[in-house]
Image (cartoon, grey):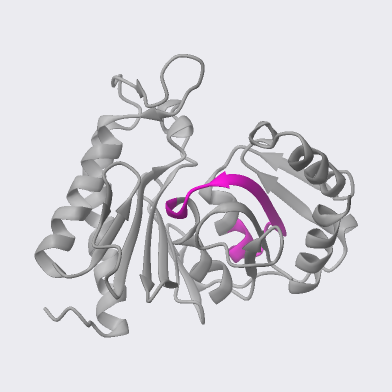
């Protein structure tokens, strides 16, 4: 197959990547697996055989199908990052949920062309859900059928639902800035990792605020949210493609209000 595939070929390939990663992960979910700590004493960043098996399966498929494409993966690093097409992989986003038996983790599969995210999927193999976007359109397939995704209008913080994985990821001035936003929203919820962003795209959540993200935490989600009508930027309104401090919102008017509160000293 050509190293310059058509958009339709790429979408079909996303499904293949989801299939192989899901088959690698599911035998380990809710099993008594060994959990390793990548950070050692004093901090906790878990990794399991499922993370590594899923990324290995995706890398193997990529090497067979698109050997000239680059890869950035959480578990096995970087290959050919100067390529026109670079796949950005997080085999299990939400490993803490995974090892706790909670089905709020997902496999993130993103594609950049010339540094810009052009396609992404969040796949949850246990629930059988796939959230997909190409920056112009976003769609869902799952147990309750298939449909297009669309964010909901919400311009007022007082009406907004805010998600973050945990406020504990925010330190010092970041936490103070985040608290300015949380104190003004209708509802704040924690702990659902990539699902929070997908719920923005699906129109159930209005904004997500996080910090300390890696590219593989967010690249796959940008085309999904943008395709559904939302916005993803850094806290200062720039590109979120490199991770760091990220805001995602369903309504661009709300997004501007969130950014203004985060910037207020």
**Residue at the location (53% across, 54% down)?**
243
Q: 143 or 94: nearer the eye?
A: 94
Can residue 41 be seen here? The reply is yes
Q: Is residue 41 above or below residue 188?
A: above
Q: 256 or 23: nearer the eye?
A: 256
Can residue 146 be seen here? The reply is no
Image quadrant containing the N terminus: bottom left
Q: Is residue 214 magenta?
A: yes
Quadrant in which residue 60 is drawn: bottom left
Pick out the residue farthest to the bottom.
6
Number of numbered discs visible in the structure rendering: 0
Residue 4 in the figure: left or right of residue 136: left
Q: Is residue 255 above or below residue 265?
A: below
Q: Position of residue 96 (x, y in %)?
A: 47, 30
Pick out the residue farthest to the front.
82
Residue 241 in the figure: left or right of residue 216: right
Residue 189 in the figure: left or right of residue 1: right
**Residue at the location (30% across, 19% down)?**
32
Q: Position of residue 169 (x, y in %)?
A: 63, 35
**Residue at the location (74% across, 70% down)?**
251
Residue 227 in the figure: left or right of residue 13: right
Quadrant in which residue 12 is drawn: bottom left
Question: What stretch of residues is rendered in magenta?
Answer: 199-216
Q: Is residue 154 magenta?
A: no
Q: 11 or 43: nearer the eye?
A: 43
Q: Position of residue 69 (x, y in %)?
A: 22, 68
């Amino acid at each position: 197959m050509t190293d310059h595939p058509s958009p339709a070929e790429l979408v079909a390939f996303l499904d293949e990547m989801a299939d192989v990663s899901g088959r690698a992960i599911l035998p380990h979910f809710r099993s008594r697996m060994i959990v390793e700590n990548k950070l050692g004493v004093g901090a906790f960043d878990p990794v399991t055989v499922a993370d590594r098996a899923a990324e290995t399966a995706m890398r193997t498929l990529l090497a067979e199908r698109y050997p000239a494409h680059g890869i950035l993966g959480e578990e096995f690093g970087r290959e050919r990052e100067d390529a026109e097409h670079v796949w950005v992989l997080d085999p299990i986003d939400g490993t803490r949920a995974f090892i706790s038996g909670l089905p709020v983790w997902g496999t993130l599969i993103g594609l950049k062309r010339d540094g810009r995210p052009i396609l992404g999927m969040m796949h949850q193999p246990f629930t059988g859900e796939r959230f997909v976007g190409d920056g112009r359109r976003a769609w869902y397939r799952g147990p309750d059928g298939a449909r297009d995704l669309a964010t909901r209008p919400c311009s007022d913080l007082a009406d907004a639902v805010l998600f973050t994985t945990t406020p504990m990821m925010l330190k010092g001035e970041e936490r103070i800035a985040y608290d300015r936003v949380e104190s003004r929203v209708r509802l704040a919820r924690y702990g659902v990792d990539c699902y929070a962003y997908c719920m923005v795209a699906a129109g159930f959540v209005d904004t997500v605020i996080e910090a300390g993200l890696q590219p593989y935490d967010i690249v796959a989600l940008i085309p999904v949210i943008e395709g559904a009508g939302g916005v993803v930027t850094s806290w200062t309104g720039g590109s979120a493609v490199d991770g760091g401090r990220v805001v995602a919102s369903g309504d661009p008017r709300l997004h501007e209000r969130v950014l203004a509160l985060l910037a207020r000293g």
